[in-house]
Image (spheres, grey):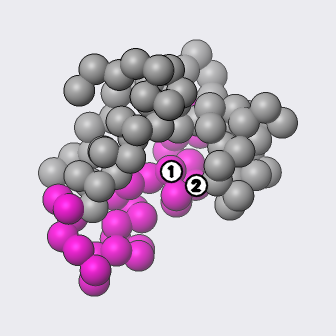
Amino acid sequence: MVFPCTKCGACCRTLKHVPVLSSYDTGNGVCRYLKNNLCSIYENRPLICNVEKMYAAYFREIMTEDEFVSVNAEACIQIAERFTGDFAR
């Protein structure tokens, strides 16, 4: 299963909730590498920003990849809903 990113940018606009990414925060919760609603360092983004690599590094012993993608997809929807107030499932 591939992570169904909608490229809404909500996760990149809520860094204040992710202490490990504090050095990426421009001071208002927005990632300094978010350009035109896309990650300008996508190929070299932090591990926490890469669902597939996070699964392989930390979660493959705990759950299936499909379960991990599903959990992250639901979290993504919740972040988008809180950020925008609206999100189509």
The residue singled out by tag 1 in the image is 49
Instruction: Categorize mark 1 by other alpha carbons within 10 Å: few (<14), some (14-19), many (20+).
Output: some
Residue closest to the far bottom? 61
Q: Quadrant of the C terminus?
A: top left
Q: Position of residue 62 (x, y in %)?
A: 28, 80
Residue at 35%, 22% in the rendered image: 87
The amino acid beneath tag 1 is Cys
Q: Is residue 21 above or below residue 29?
A: below
Circle 2 sits in a helix, a strand or a loop, which is it? loop
Q: Position of residue 9 (x, y in %)?
A: 51, 28
Residue at 62%, 32% in the rendered image: 13
Q: Position of residue 28 (x, y in %)?
A: 79, 32
- The residue segment tinted magenta is 38-67
Of 60 and 39, which appears nearest the observer?
A: 60
The amino acid beneath tag 2 is Pro
Determine whether label 2 and label 1 are within 8 Å by CB. yes
Q: Is residue 39 above or below residue 88?
A: below
The residue singled out by tag 2 in the image is 46
